[in-house]
Image: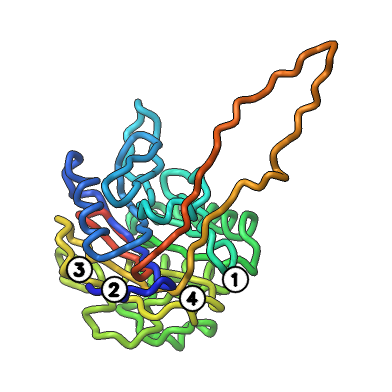
Amino acid sequence: MNHNNNNNNNSYNNSDLQQVNDARKTTIINRELAKRNIDIAALQEKRVSANGSLKEKTSTLSGRGLGPDEHCVDGVGNAVRNSILVSVQPPFHGNVRIISLLLYTSSGPTHILSAYSPTLSSSAEVKDIFYEELKKKIIRGITEKDDLILLGDFNARVGADFSSWSNRDGHFGVSKLNDDGLRLFELCSFNNLCITITVFATKPHQRVYWRHPRFNYLHQLGLFITRKFMLNHVSLTRSYHNADCNTDHSLVGSKVCLRPRQFNIRDSQVQRIRLSIEKPATIPRVCPVSVQRLRLSGDIQSASDIGNTKAV
């Protein structure tokens, strides 16, 4: 996949790590992101019982897991190009199914949520809990005017019948609508969101990212979702089946026009210390922060599944 060398374009991607050997996961992800000039990737099914980050040659991977004594079958994370880390505010908040980061851009903050929905075999209660947590993240933590991007594997079939949902924007869905698709449409309807892969009239094979191993049905499960008012910044969302990721999921990418900018710690935010002759004050250690001007090239792409690293 080729990207335009434009400072206004960024690349986001989603990845599924389930089938990638643990010793090779980060290397494969870093290689694929660099090869496709991807700036931010959402990672699902990390299956790592730990929280933290790892810096590779071109990207820094971070994620959420469970405790060291707990068996983690889910796990989500993000991979961010090292050159734009100066535009991302740490830390990364979330749990094993939802993780968020804040990207500073010239037009304001952009909230990016990486999500991994419970599978179809999960109980309705587990699915309801997931969507309630996602709603709380969107409603309580993000204002309606802020830019919002959802990346991930939602295990939801949105269907090809666009007339079945009055607020639906895209006419290029695939398959039949299921219960998880209804949950997702409800979330999108109440929060002014749009499933971008259904908006673009791409080739049929570019609208799907996973094939059912038994019935060979093609599905749109890895999705790139934005606010409706952000659609004019999204130039394309499609799947890429040629990514060498050792996975049965394809890469889903979205090109978004955003200009990341550095965030600064203002001097006014530094608390002044009053010194007393009677009682000496404890002066905290201050570490200087040096931030370089950001120069970004590439497109924002949402990749689904890098080496069974589901990239959304």
**According to the image, label 3 marks what residue?**
211
Tag 4, which secondary structure?
strand
Q: Earlier in the sequence, mark 1 or mark 2?
A: 2
Indicate the quadrant where residue 246 lies: bottom left
Image quadrant containing the C terminus: bottom left
- Disc number placed over residue 3 in the picture, else none: 2
On screen, residue 296 versus residue 265, left or right, reads: left
Residue type pointed to by label 2:
His
* Pointer 3 local density, CA inside 10 Å: few below 14, some 14–19, many at least 20: some
**What label sits on residue 249 in the rendered view?**
none
Looking at the picture, how far across and down is residue 228, in whole percent? 54, 77
Q: What kind of element bears circle 2? A: loop
Distance from label 3 to label 1 (Cα)?
Answer: 30 Å
Q: Viewer-nearest of labels 1 and 2? A: 2
Element under disc 3: strand
Q: Which amino acid type corresponds to the residue marked 1 in the rendered image?
A: Phe
Quadrant (top left/top right/bottom left/bottom right) for the N terminus: bottom left
CA separation, marks 2 and 3?
A: 26 Å
Circles 2 and 3, Cβ within 8 Å, touching? The answer is no
Q: Residues within 10 Å of mark 1 (few under 14, many from 20)?
A: few
x, y percent for residue 244:
14, 61
Considering the numbered disc 1 on the image, is that residue within a helix, a strand or a loop? helix
- Say which mark, if any, is on residue 190: 1
Measured in 3D between alpha carbons, the distance from the residue under mark 4 to the one under mark 1, in whole angstroms, is 11 Å
Q: With 44 as the anchor, is 102 left or right in this view?
A: right
